[in-house]
Image: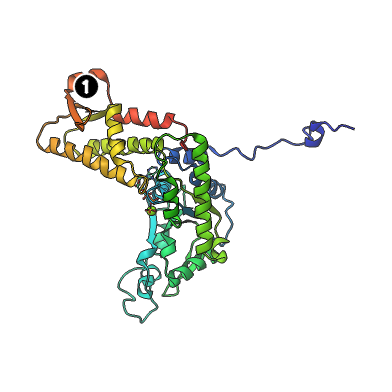
Amino acid sequence: MEIEIEEILELDKFDILDPNLQSAEAADFERFLSGKVIGQDQALKALSEIFQVYRAGIAASGRPIGTLLFLGPTGTGKTKTVEAAAEVVFGTNAVIKIDCAEFQHPHEIAKLKGSPPGYLGHRETSPMLTQENLDRCHNDQNKLTFLLFDEIEKASDSLWNLLLAILDKGSLTLGDNRKVDFSRTIIIMTSNLGAREMQTLTSKKMGFISAQKEACTAEKIDQIALTAARKHFSPEFMNRIDKIAVFQTLSRQSMRKILLLELANVQARLLQSAQEKFHLQFSSDALALILNQGINTQYNARPLKRAVEKLVVLPLANMLSSSQLQTGDLIVVDSVTNKGLIFKRKREERAKADGANLLEQLITEIMKAKPATA
Ligand SMILES: Nc1ncnc2c1ncn2[C@@H]1O[C@H](COP(=O)(O)OP(=O)(O)OP(=O)(O)O)[C@@H](O)[C@H]1O
Ligand SMILES: [Mg+2]
């Protein structure tokens, strides 16, 4: 006998709920984050899911809200993602950041948890991991702390023990016996284990490659990162992690979006701090020239920032300080083959008539684009 689907669902007695429907707030969190971090959907999703559990108020007690491990090559946005998440939640990049390489010796661990009374330096400086420090950025809506352990593969044994204790019990006892509660903390750890191997894989792949090849490379990078992590870290540690996200080498298309974000930042800086307030506009040739100089398969987005400083910020600083620019001007940045960038000025009245504004142009372009894995 055939059973009707309505009978199984008992629609007359129950309402069917949608387990994938996010709150508007969590959806906004992911959307705003993807406007700041490009091409790393796996990590953004992992972070958004933890945020959603926290906002629903059902995070497990007696442990951190979530524990994430970010793996992947240098310059792909691991640290940026954590800072951007704090910016989305609090409006500032309020992250407690621990560079594991800097805490190698027992006296350096004391900078984190303080030393017992009577020890040298006991009262000199306040340790980093006090409850006040953790709670400093909380506001009425969000009692949440982002705690970042950068480059954990470089952690010394004593830092490692401290970290395991926090992950396990969600608390830490300071040198002076005060207890610190980490149950309102999202802990993110980063590592670029396996980076050299990943780089060999991707060094020839920059440029426009097929989506199929890109997916295959992404899968291989995932495998390299996870294998390296499993080899290096103890199962005891790996079992305490809620989610592992592998950051991918950035494609040319993602790098172009990051370039637009960097230029939008330059525009914002100019409007906030320069005495003469003017707008910038870039031709596609100019964008391509900056991108070509900033693209690098080894260091990903890092050289791009340097290219923007050298090719755009420094010339603008020169033009500003030699009084060549005035408020209201529109500066069109163009490129002529083999001649580098050229800067053309359109005076205020004509610029107004054009209604040109780079910030708006860039932000619409980035927002219009679907979250980029491309
Ligand atoms: N996916 C990305 N989206 C937007 N900006 C990015 C991205 N990746 C890198 N950047 C830019 O490059 C800079 C360096 O990135 P970030 O510090 O996050 O790299 P990382 O992955 O933490 O590298 P490392 O392993 O060396 O610490 C960031 O400040 C940001 O401006
Ligand atoms: Mg980093």
Q: Secondary structure at mark 1?
A: helix
Kindly identify which residue carries mark 1: 351
> From what the image shows, is residue 90 above or below residue 256?
below
Rendered image coloring scheme? rainbow
> From what the image shows, is residue 170 above or below residue 311?
below
Q: Is residue 17 left or right of residue 36?
A: right
Q: Position of residue 330 (x, y in %)?
A: 21, 26
> From what the image shows, is residue 233 above or below residue 80?
below
Dot 1 amino acid type = Ala
The residue located at (26%, 44%) in the rendering is: 306
Residue 66 seen: no
The residue located at (37%, 73%) in the rendering is: 105
Q: Position of residue 196 (x, y in %)?
A: 41, 54
Q: Position of residue 190 (x, y in %)?
A: 44, 56
Mark 1 neighbour class, 10 Å CA radius: few under 14, some 14 to 19, many 20 or more = some
Q: Position of residue 327 (x, y in %)?
A: 17, 29
Q: Nearer the viewer, residue 93 or 282?
A: 282
Q: Is residue 300 left or right of residue 49?
A: left
Q: Quadrant of the N terminus?
A: top right
Residue 18 seen: yes
| Furthest residue in direction left, as rendered | 322
Q: Nearer the viewer, residue 110 or 231?
A: 231
The residue located at (50%, 58%) in the rendering is: 228
